[in-house]
Amino acid sequence: MVLKLIGKVLGIVLLLGGISIGGLFAAGVLGVPDGGLEDNRWGEVDNESIEVLTDIYVDNPNPFGVGGDIDAEYDIYLQDTHMASGQEENLGISSGDNEFNLTTELYHQNLPAWWVAHLNNDEVSDLDVAATVHASVGPFSGSPSTTYSDEIETDLEGALDEGFSSFEGTYSGTETDFRIGGTAVEPTIDVEDVTTEWGDVTENNTEIMATMTIHNPNAYPIPTPAFAGNLTFNDISMANWNADEVEVLEVDDDGLIPPGETEERTFVVEMDTQQIPHWFGSHVDEDEFTTMEVTGQFAMEVGGSELTIPENDEAITCTFDVTTSIFVDQEDGVSDEGCDLNPFEMSDGAISDADATHDPEDDDTDDSNDSDGEDEGDEEDEDDGLLSDTGLTT
């Protein structure tokens, strides 16, 4: 009723006063509605889609409503990857403040591309959300827009690095049956340092590079250990590698580490980038929270006896909590929840298939004393010589 009365008054002013619409705009009586972005949040999530809810505002300065002359649109970008867009046409607005909620789906298929861009930018993504309102009142129109920008950071590489660093220490095969010259021997390996970084990242595979600095304190060569394990995000398998599937860099053909020497070995594990959409949905559904678990075991065979790192056929499992703040108001980051030992068994034949075996007795074969006249005393002397040569004497 009031709006109709105002309209009649304006009509009388136009007819009797000869005031043009342009004059009313100039006088501030009429104006083009303003608008922009109000808020973003996540909507419903399922296995195939992630909803994005965007609130826009339209401020109509006119003393009357405008019907069907307002269009609104918005776009979301993460590290220049187009993640979502939405629009609403022919909106009718009342005088004063108006708010509209737009719903669209995140571009699931673009999440692997974002992951590549994110990791290649040191796990930093620029978030840009732009909203534009197209409005017209009579012969006048405008397209005001606003942009919300933020920086999204993660440190998944740091979590992996911290998890794998738990392998550092000295390990001995205390329960092995390995003997040299009849004397029981405990093969030992010193893991001095383990670091982790991302390797090549594509929309199909993401390389995890784990570099181990190994010291061999034994008097005989030891093989490069085999490496097996898995990585999960919110109980979703992101990588599950057998020892014989892992490429080892910076290693000679035989992979042996000489006695008393310290050498580096880089193990290349492949993660399935196509699992990123599946994980991201769970991350959003948990209010941008992820439980990350990394499990690993190294193993080798010396003289026919297996040695696992950790010992006793166990693996190290480290847990981390990962939070982001894309559309959730919270502190982002990674927190270490600690590591545990769990039973773990490599697949049959994985150690030999990974060339992580060596028999030190083969290194000390001496054919020069072979003769038909050899007696038991000679054999005992040979055994004694073998032990002294290796530094393993009783």
Image: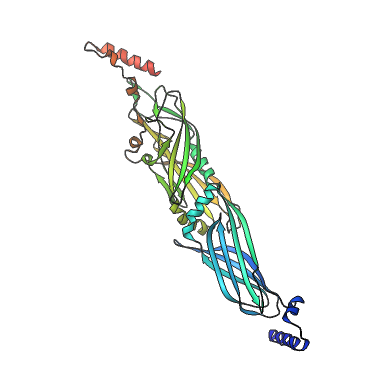
Drawn side of residue 22 relative to residue 304, left or right: right
Q: Locate residue 91: give its quadrant.
A: bottom right
Is 62 situated above or below 358?
below
- Viewer-nearest residue: 242 or 81: 81
Q: How is the image coloured?
A: rainbow
The residue shown at (36%, 17%) is 387
Residue 146 image point, x, y percent: 64, 64
The residue shown at (21%, 12%) is 372
- Viewer-nearest residue: 86 or 41: 86
Drawn side of residue 205 relative to residue 121, left or right: left
Residue 131 image point, x, y percent: 61, 65
Is 15 situated above or below 66?
below
Q: Locate residue 184: give its quadrant.
A: top left
Residue 176 image point, x, y percent: 36, 29
Drawn side of residue 285 relative to residue 141, left or right: left
- Viewer-nearest residue: 38 or 233: 38
Residue 4 image point, x, y percent: 69, 86
Is 357 situated above or below 95?
above
The residue shown at (58%, 68%) is 73
Is 290 situated above or below 146?
above
Instruction: Quarter of the image for the N terminus: give it.
Output: bottom right
